[in-house]
Image (cartoon, rainbow, N blue to C red):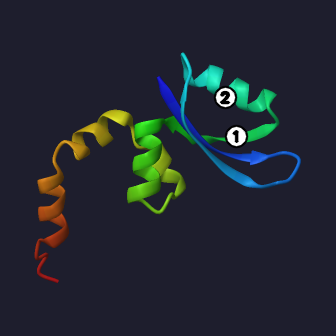
Amino acid sequence: MKFSATVKDRQTGELIHIENKEYPNITAFRKDLARNGFSVHKNHIAESGRYNFILNYTNGESWHWDIKQQVLRDISDRPAVLGDLATADCGL
Protein backbone atom coordinates (compact mmCIF):
# COMPACT_ATOMS: atom_id res chain seq x y z
CA MET A 1 0.00 0.00 0.00
CA LYS A 2 1.28 3.51 -0.77
CA PHE A 3 1.37 6.26 1.85
CA SER A 4 2.19 9.97 1.89
CA ALA A 5 2.86 12.47 4.67
CA THR A 6 3.82 16.02 5.48
CA VAL A 7 6.74 15.81 7.88
CA LYS A 8 9.03 18.18 9.72
CA ASP A 9 12.78 17.62 9.62
CA ARG A 10 13.88 17.66 13.27
CA GLN A 11 17.28 19.17 12.46
CA THR A 12 16.28 21.99 10.10
CA GLY A 13 12.60 22.47 10.98
CA GLU A 14 11.76 22.32 7.26
CA LEU A 15 8.36 20.95 6.18
CA ILE A 16 8.66 18.23 3.54
CA HIS A 17 6.07 16.30 1.53
CA ILE A 18 6.93 12.62 1.23
CA GLU A 19 4.66 10.96 -1.30
CA ASN A 20 3.77 7.53 -2.66
CA LYS A 21 6.03 5.33 -0.53
CA GLU A 22 5.27 1.62 -0.44
CA TYR A 23 4.86 0.12 3.07
CA PRO A 24 2.85 -2.82 4.44
CA ASN A 25 0.86 -0.50 6.74
CA ILE A 26 0.72 3.08 8.01
CA THR A 27 2.44 2.20 11.29
CA ALA A 28 5.53 0.90 9.47
CA PHE A 29 5.62 4.11 7.40
CA ARG A 30 5.29 6.32 10.50
CA LYS A 31 8.03 4.41 12.37
CA ASP A 32 10.40 4.61 9.40
CA LEU A 33 9.88 8.36 9.14
CA ALA A 34 10.60 8.77 12.86
CA ARG A 35 13.77 6.64 12.58
CA ASN A 36 14.96 8.89 9.76
CA GLY A 37 14.69 12.08 11.82
CA PHE A 38 11.24 13.34 10.87
CA SER A 39 8.35 14.25 13.10
CA VAL A 40 4.90 13.49 11.75
CA HIS A 41 1.62 15.05 12.84
CA LYS A 42 -0.83 12.19 13.36
CA ASN A 43 -3.36 13.70 10.95
CA HIS A 44 -0.95 14.56 8.14
CA ILE A 45 -0.17 11.00 7.16
CA ALA A 46 -2.52 8.96 5.00
CA GLU A 47 -2.95 6.61 2.07
CA SER A 48 -1.62 8.40 -1.00
CA GLY A 49 -5.01 8.78 -2.71
CA ARG A 50 -6.58 10.39 0.36
CA TYR A 51 -3.52 12.56 0.99
CA ASN A 52 -3.49 13.85 -2.61
CA PHE A 53 -7.23 14.54 -2.53
CA ILE A 54 -6.91 16.61 0.65
CA LEU A 55 -3.97 18.61 -0.72
CA ASN A 56 -5.53 19.18 -4.14
CA TYR A 57 -9.20 19.77 -3.32
CA THR A 58 -9.37 21.21 0.20
CA ASN A 59 -7.60 23.92 2.14
CA GLY A 60 -6.17 21.31 4.54
CA GLU A 61 -8.09 22.24 7.67
CA SER A 62 -7.87 19.73 10.49
CA TRP A 63 -11.37 18.32 9.88
CA HIS A 64 -10.47 17.50 6.25
CA TRP A 65 -7.95 14.95 7.50
CA ASP A 66 -10.81 13.12 9.24
CA ILE A 67 -12.52 12.39 5.90
CA LYS A 68 -12.57 8.64 5.43
CA GLN A 69 -11.11 6.92 2.36
CA GLN A 70 -14.48 5.44 1.31
CA VAL A 71 -16.09 8.89 1.22
CA LEU A 72 -13.30 10.14 -1.05
CA ARG A 73 -13.73 7.11 -3.30
CA ASP A 74 -17.47 7.79 -3.55
CA ILE A 75 -16.86 11.46 -4.36
CA SER A 76 -14.20 10.80 -6.98
CA ASP A 77 -16.46 8.25 -8.72
CA ARG A 78 -19.01 10.98 -9.42
CA PRO A 79 -17.21 14.02 -10.90
CA ALA A 80 -20.31 15.08 -12.83
CA VAL A 81 -22.29 15.33 -9.59
CA LEU A 82 -19.63 17.51 -8.03
CA GLY A 83 -19.64 19.72 -11.12
CA ASP A 84 -23.43 20.04 -10.95
CA LEU A 85 -23.29 20.98 -7.27
CA ALA A 86 -20.56 23.53 -7.85
CA THR A 87 -22.56 25.29 -10.56
CA ALA A 88 -26.06 24.83 -9.13
CA ASP A 89 -28.12 27.94 -8.47
CA CYS A 90 -28.79 27.94 -4.75
CA GLY A 91 -31.22 30.83 -4.96
CA LEU A 92 -29.14 33.09 -2.75
The residue indicated by pointer 2 is 30
Toward which corner of the image does residue 90 lie, by quadrant?
bottom left
In the displayed orientation, state which residue is furthest to the bottom: 92
| Left or right: residue 44 compared with residue 53 | right
Where residue 37 appears, x then y in whole percent? 82, 36
Q: Are marks 2 and 1 in contact (CB under 8 Å)?
A: yes
Toward which corner of the image does residue 43 lie, by quadrant?
top right
- In the image, is residue 12 above or below residue 5? below
- In the image, is residue 39 above or below residue 21? below
Residue visible at 84% across and 45% down? 10
Residue visible at 37% across and 35% down? 69
Where residue 81 appears, x then y in whole percent? 13, 55
The residue indicated by pointer 1 is 40
Mark 2: amino acid: Arg
Where residue 27 appears, x then y in whole percent? 62, 22
Residue visible at 24% across and 46% down? 75
- How many numbered markers are drawn? 2
Where residue 46 appears, x then y in whole percent? 51, 36
Mark 1: amino acid: Val
Q: Secondary structure at mark 2?
A: helix
